[in-house]
Image (cartoon, rainbow, N blue to C red):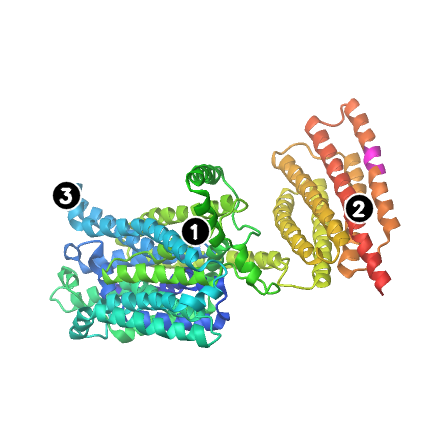
Amino acid sequence: MDLYLFSIIILAGLAVFDLIVGVSNDAVNFMNSSIGSKVAPRHIIMIVASLGMLAGVTFSSGMMEVARKGIFHPKFFLMPELLTIFLAVMLADILLLDLFNTFGLPTSTTVSIVFELLGAAVAVSIIKITMDGDSYMKLVEYINTGKALAIIMGILLSVVVAFSFGVMIQFIVRTLFTFDYEIRLKRYGGLWGGVALSIITYFIIIKGAKGASFLSPEAVAWIKTHSWTILVSSFIFFGILFQLLTLFTKINILKPIVLVGTFALAMAFAGNDLVNFIGVPLAGITAYDFASGSGNPLTATMEALQRPIQTNTLLLLLAGAIMVATLWISRKAQTVTQTEISLARQDEGIERFGSSNLSRVIVGMVYTVSSILRKLIPVSMKRGISGRLDSGAGKKAGSGAEKSPPFDLLRASVNLIVSSALISFATSLKLPLSTTYVTFMVAMGTSLSDQAWGRESAVYRVTGVMAVIGGWFLTAFAAFTTALIFAFLIYFLKLFAILGLLLFAAYMILVTYRYHTKKQEESSAIEAFDLQAIDNADTAVGITFEQTGQFLKDISDNLTVCFEAASSEDLESLRNTRRDAEKIRKRTNIIVENIFKTLFLVHSSDMDSAYRYSHSVRALQSISDSHRDLITRTCEHFENYHTGFMDDQKEELRHIKTHLTRLLWNTSIMLMRRKKVDYDYITNQCSKIKELVTEFDKNQVTRIEKAESRTRLSILFYEILENALAIGRQTHNLLSVFRESFEGDKTNH
């Protein structure tokens, strides 16, 4: 029994780690609407969510049965076999969730635990069938196929249901209130508040009461009997309260609705998803206790796990406390949160995902269908609807200077109300509905209904959604396969497998932690370029100068490494320069976006300045494109193990590098420090680069005529010269654009 007691201790420890990685992934489910709408400071949102989780864990007792008997029939297994299943599940779950958290993809903890239980149970069942010499058709007797299929279908159906409800409810609410909703809230905001809070009351208190560990059966029965009374009373009370607040105070009633909705969704998450983190360890402890109390613990079957068991409330609160602590300290939770916010934001900007052929096809089909439907709708109706769905109205009504949130409070309230209602209803039916699927698809549905996916962003948003959904299917396959393999290893290798898998898990978590830290640093460096909420044109112009100077400095440093690595044929350094070139390209896009923001500020007062800065966009993009082309072609040449440069070519490229990097470096210093421009010096540097390129072109022709230089090497040499010349020329043009600003500063002083 010592091995099995050790297994129980390991399960308890894994439960803590699973809570940590699980909450890091699922914080996105109940935090995004509040964070995305900026309803309150982040610490206030965190406090509300924390209180919701602590309340929700006490409603999760009934859900714990899923881990004990939801996927397989425990009566067919012995205690050692169940512990094998549970250990395999927990180890696989921690590894998979941590991996998804690292890449910032919100996956489903419910899907992972269901398929891990299924995979591990199938593995142990196959072993038992093989050892008994039975037919593999008997596998259906071990697995609770009916319940497992119901859970899986419920999870998949939740994707369609959540998206559909998100689209429909948001369309109705937005049409009623519009984007400029302040005036309409005064008229019938109480009605919306009454509906919102009564829905939350109904689904959280009435439907969730069945799983509460602290309510007696009599109390649950009373709540069920008087459900309509509670619902109607809640609607009347909250409706009157919010209407009075809108009429006699300056309180924006959407803020308390969003905060209460955050509390409700955090509560629903804890009530529904706590089973994903501690349900399996609790089932293992229960199995060990029952086996220890029997006459022969190693051969006693586990029929006792079929019976309903009430989980201790203090144990649930302890789990809730760990979840709350994780919510406050987890960096990976913030990474996962940013994915959904970027896909749901109302305004355009730098997209987190690229485009794909499939997303283009989907957007093209939807655009074609919508064009046909628009022709069938009467013009008067079309004008009326489009007028009420005009997102520009809300912007005109805003403060202007303050940076607008990714989406407004009205959409945030719909996200929270619809999500919490669906999840709480599933909890009352003891169906482990995926909170990630529901909240993500509701958010995508409401953003689509709000026309956040415009023609400028639709392809990228669809790519992002497909990437997340694809990750969900990958979760199911990876969870099943990983748990199955782990179960086989633990069954046959016992302690060696347990210790080996623990070490493997610890190593992988360390690797992903380092990777995530590095990615965070890179992301912070890129985000540092993002122009914040600035209403002063001079400040915005100054930041643009600094960013452009830093951009040129980064290119100078990157080109220096590239030329030296090409000369020494250092392939690893060349690959690093290619990765750096991609980061620089992303920064270029942000700088260009910031220039457009700056143009918006200077447009009304200085048309000449606006015209000047618009020309800098073309120069920046040309420099970035030439830089990336030079780096990419050089790297590909040596990756294909083609011939390296001759000594004469190396010397000529060294001269090009010296003058080009000197040009970039000096220009960057002038821009970052707003120093007086030595325009003649920069012009001379550009002329010198042009002269060198012309001279080296002739030298290369001579080498080709003498058959000294191979064809691919000659092509690369010419490409480097042309790109270097283009970078120098466009840097000169860029400085010409900014030159008048320097002279203007001098005149003003």
User: Where residue 304 sits in the image (x, y, percent)?
Assistant: 14, 63
Residue designated by label 2:
732
Q: Amino acid at mark 3?
A: Gly
In terms of image quadrants, where is residue 717?
Answer: top right
**342 or 658: nearer the viewer:** 342
Quote the CA–CA distance across marks 3 and 2: 81 Å
Mark 3 or mark 1, whichever is nearer to me: 1
Q: Secondary structure at mark 3?
A: loop
Question: Position of 272 compared to 628: left or right?
Answer: left
**Circles 3 and 1: CB distance less than 8 Å?**
no
User: Where residue 354 sits in the image (x, y, percent)?
Assistant: 53, 45
Work out whether mark 3 precedes mark 2 in sequence or the reverse, and give the earlier one.
3
Residue 171 painted magenta: no
Range of residues picked out in magenta:
691-696
Residue designated by label 1:
449
Q: Residue at x 69, y 60 (%)?
A: 540
Residue designated by label 3:
133
Farthest-out residue, left: 295
Q: Amino acid at mark 1?
A: Ser
Compared with 639, 231 (above or below) is below
Question: Position of 362 compared to 85: left or right?
Answer: right
Crowding around mark 2 (Cα neighbors within 10 Å: few <14, some 14 to 19, many 20+) is: many
